[in-house]
Amino acid sequence: MSIIVSAEDIEKFNALLQKEKDFKENSRKRANKYYHKHFKLNDNMGEEEKEIVKKNIADRQKKLSEKYRNNRDFFISRQKQYRKNKLERLKREAEEENTA
């Protein structure tokens, strides 16, 4: 079984692929530009700019550590709840075996 595709369809498809590649490339460039502006220390920066960048880096680290801490606390609480439920289930099963 063969599929017949017109040259127009191939051109449209290639144009869409190129548009998607350009969008990804531009997004990456924008992200790098933002990063270098807000989080990268340069030698030719003034003292005020360096302080702002250091503050941005500290804020970002604080947010990331808080996010990690929240995720870790959530995971630990889920583990405790799972163990508690498992223990209760085992106790119930043991009682049912003793009564049977």
Image (cartoon, rainbow, N blue to C red):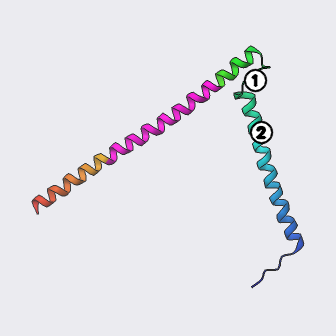
- Other-residue count near label 2 (Cα within 10 Å), few / some / many at <14 / 14–19 / ≥20: few
Look at label 1 and name its amino acid: Asn
Residue 22: % across, % down: 82, 50
Provide the residue designation for mark 2.
Answer: 30
Q: Which residue is drawn at 76% across and 44% down?
A: 27
Q: In this view, does 19 lie above or below 38?
A: below
Tell me which residue sits at (56%, 33%) in the image.
Answer: 64
Furthest-front residue in this view: 43
51 lies left or right of 71: right
Name the mark on residue 42.
1
Residue 51 percent location from the top left of the image: 69, 17
Residue 32, quarter of the rendered image: top right
Quarter the N terminus occupies: bottom right
User: What residue range appears in magenta?
Assistant: 57-82
Q: Is mark 2 on a helix, strand or loop?
A: helix
Are circles 2 and 1 on residues that touch, CB within 8 Å? no
Between disc 2 and disc 1, the foreground one is 1
Q: Which mark is residue 60?
A: none
What amino acid is at disc 2?
Arg
Marks 2 and 1, the one that precedes in the sequence: 2
Q: How many marks?
A: 2
Is-magenta flag for residue 53? Answer: no
Label 1 residue SS: loop
Quadrant housing residue 17:
bottom right
Give the residue furthest to the left: 99
